[in-house]
Amino acid sequence: MADIDAFLDRLNPEMCVVTAAVGEQRAGCLVGFSAQCSMRPARYVVWLSKLNRTYEVACDADRLTVHLLTRDRHDLAALFGGESGDEVDKFTRVRWRREDDGALVLEDAAAWFVGIVRTRVDGGDHVGFVLEPVRGGGQAEEGPLLRLRDALDISPGHPVD
């Protein structure tokens, strides 16, 4: 394998929280791997760890919600990144709502969109969920987005292989 650490160490992507729901099951996690992957049609991909409970719920979900956080919402990042959904119901600690189609929206996110899962791509220890955005929203206030370097102090809530 080529040593790409020098390349990867320079990256500082925006972090997001992805939520999924199927019936009464709900889950959410902090995601560091995500990006727009098509302009026409509009598509966005989020990569979920196979070790994460959110991945398990997302595999049965037909839509996911992707949330951007500002740096001042490090608490949400710590909850969704540092706690395991196998042990904690994260949604009892945050303001959220269920949309008519079952999507879960975190009310304190800076911006969000609901996307229909169009395909899943196995990338190794993560699976990419390619989403077709169908609607979104956000808060009027702006601020710097939470990035990877802002979240390095968060220990993963699930094991890392």
Image (cartoon, grey):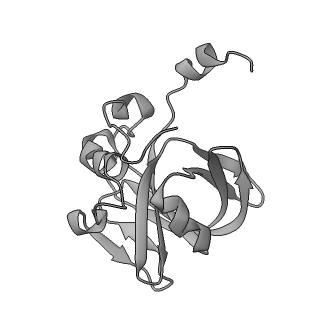
Near-viewer residue (73 or 4): 4
Question: In which image quadrant can residue 116 be found?
Answer: bottom right
Q: In the image, is residue 18 above or below residue 10?
A: below
> At x 25% / y 67%, what residue is drawn?
95
Q: Is residue 93 left or right of residue 138?
A: left
The residue sitting at the left extreme is 93
Q: In the image, is residue 70 above or below residue 90?
A: above
> At x 57% / y 52%, what residue is drawn?
50
The residue sitting at the right extreme is 40
> At x 60% / y 17%, what residue is drawn?
5
Near-viewer residue (152 or 137): 152
How many marks the image carries: the answer is 0
Q: Is residue 114 visible?
A: no
Q: Quadrant of the N terminus?
A: top right
Q: At which x and y percent is residue 134?
A: 60, 71
Q: At which x and y percent is residue 88?
A: 28, 62
Q: Is residue 60 left or right of residue 96?
A: right
Q: Is residue 62 visible?
A: yes
Q: At which x and y percent is residue 56?
A: 54, 64
Q: At which x and y percent is residue 55?
A: 54, 60
